[in-house]
Every structure is written in C-alpha cells, then in structure tokens.
Amino acid sequence: MAEARFTANGFWRGMRDGLPLGLPIFAYGLGFGLVAAQAGFGVAKAVATSAAIYSGSAQLAAVNLLQSGSATLWALFATILVVNARYILFGAALQPWLGQISAPKAYGSLLLLGDANWMFCMRAIAEGETDRAYLAGTGAPMLAGWLGGTAIGAGAVRLLPAPEALGFDLMLPGKSLWHCCWLLCMRHIGFSHQQTGTAAD
C-alpha cells in the first residue's frame, strides 16, 4: 500500500491554521518560565525542561513537587506520566490516520502534539484532511510560542521577582479549567457540524 501524503504544503496549511494557538501558548510559557525561575531554574534549564517534557500542566506539577523538597526521580516520573496520560488516548485516536506514514514521520509529528492542535487536527480529519504533515504544522506555532515564552519568562524573573503576586501560582488549575471549557466547546462544535451534515444528507 502506498504511503499517505506528507508534504510541505500540508505542513504550511497546518501552520497557518495553528498560528492563533501560538499567542495563548506563549503567554502560558511566559508564566511557566517565571515560576520555573522562581524555583531556581536558569533560562537554559527552563527551556530544556519545556523542550523535553512539552506539557505545561506536567511541568508545573513537577516544579511544585521539586519546591516541596520531597521529590524523587520516580515521583517526578510518575507525576509527569499521570498528568500526560491523556496523550495515550490522543495518539490512539490519531493512529488510524498517522499509521499510513512511516514511523519517523508519525512519531516526529506526535512530538508536536498538544491538546489544542489535537482537536484542530481531529476536526480537520473529519472534514477530509488527508495530508499527514498537517498535524506537525499545527504544532509548530505552539512549540515556538511555548519555548519562546519560557525563555522570556525565565529571563524576566529579576524584573518580576514574585510570580504569585501576578497569579501565576494559579496557572495549573486555571489551565485545567480552560481545558474543560475548550473540550466542551469543541464537542459542541463537532456535534453541531455532525447534525448539519446529517440534515444535509
């Protein structure tokens, strides 16, 4: 069976659709950078953490655990695994679509997977998207915003020495609430789209 399409055009189309995601992710990365610096992370360490884990909720949970003074390697691993468990379901949902390209392309695309672009991609697939590079394209602005925000936030801690005074200590529950609202919104959009399609048939 021939491999499915994975083209530069699909990547750029995904990047165009994913650009609106970059700004809020940048703001979130900025907050994480401030919190990480407050916990003693330098700019390089904060950015490396964001690149390696690439999950705001898991990173904030890990930083909170480190600040408690009782963190062990296994505790950190378990925390990150539990917080990111949803990505197992995300990947499983995408497998029938991504499974038609080579493993390096599929796993490389999954490295750029986030909550928001997963929903973007699932909606695009339902609407007939066939270029598998679309997923990586939607993730590129998010990655750039996340790493850029982390770097600036970690570097700006000297100007804003108390992130909690600005409410950054509430980012984890705030992001969880945002996830719930976003999922409900996307579910409503998907349901409405399905109903419209059914009515048209």
Image: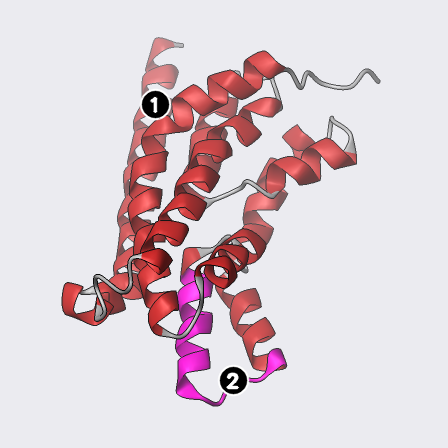
**SS category of the residue bearing label 2:** loop
Tell whether label 1 touches label 2 (CB within 8 Å). Answer: no
In the rendered image, the residue lying farthest to the top is 200
Whether residue 147 appears in magenta in the rendering, the answer is no
Which stretch is magenta?
A: 57-73
Q: Is residue 68 visible?
A: yes
Q: Nearer the viewer, residue 128 or 37?
A: 37
Residue in view at x 53 percent, y 42 percent: 113
Q: Nearer the viewer, residue 114 or 36?
A: 36
Q: Earlier in the sequence, mark 2 or mark 1?
A: 2
- The percent coordinates of residue 155 (x first, y second) are 35, 57
Q: Nearer the viewer, residue 90 or 79?
A: 79
As drawn, the label of residue 193 is 1
Residue in view at x 38 percent, y 16 percent: 197
Q: Is residue 193 left or right of residue 91?
A: left
Number of callouts:
2
Q: Is residue 127 visible?
A: no
Magenta stretch: dominant SS?
helix
Residue in view at x 29 percent, y 42 percent: 24
- The percent coordinates of residue 50 (x first, y second) are 49, 55
For disc 1, the neighbor class at 10 Å (few under 14, some 14 to 19, many from 20) is some
For disc 2, the neighbor class at 10 Å (few under 14, some 14 to 19, many from 20) is some
Q: Is residue 164 above or below residue 138?
A: below
As drawn, the label of residue 71 is 2
**SS category of the residue bearing label 1:** helix
Q: Is residue 185 above or below residue 151?
A: above
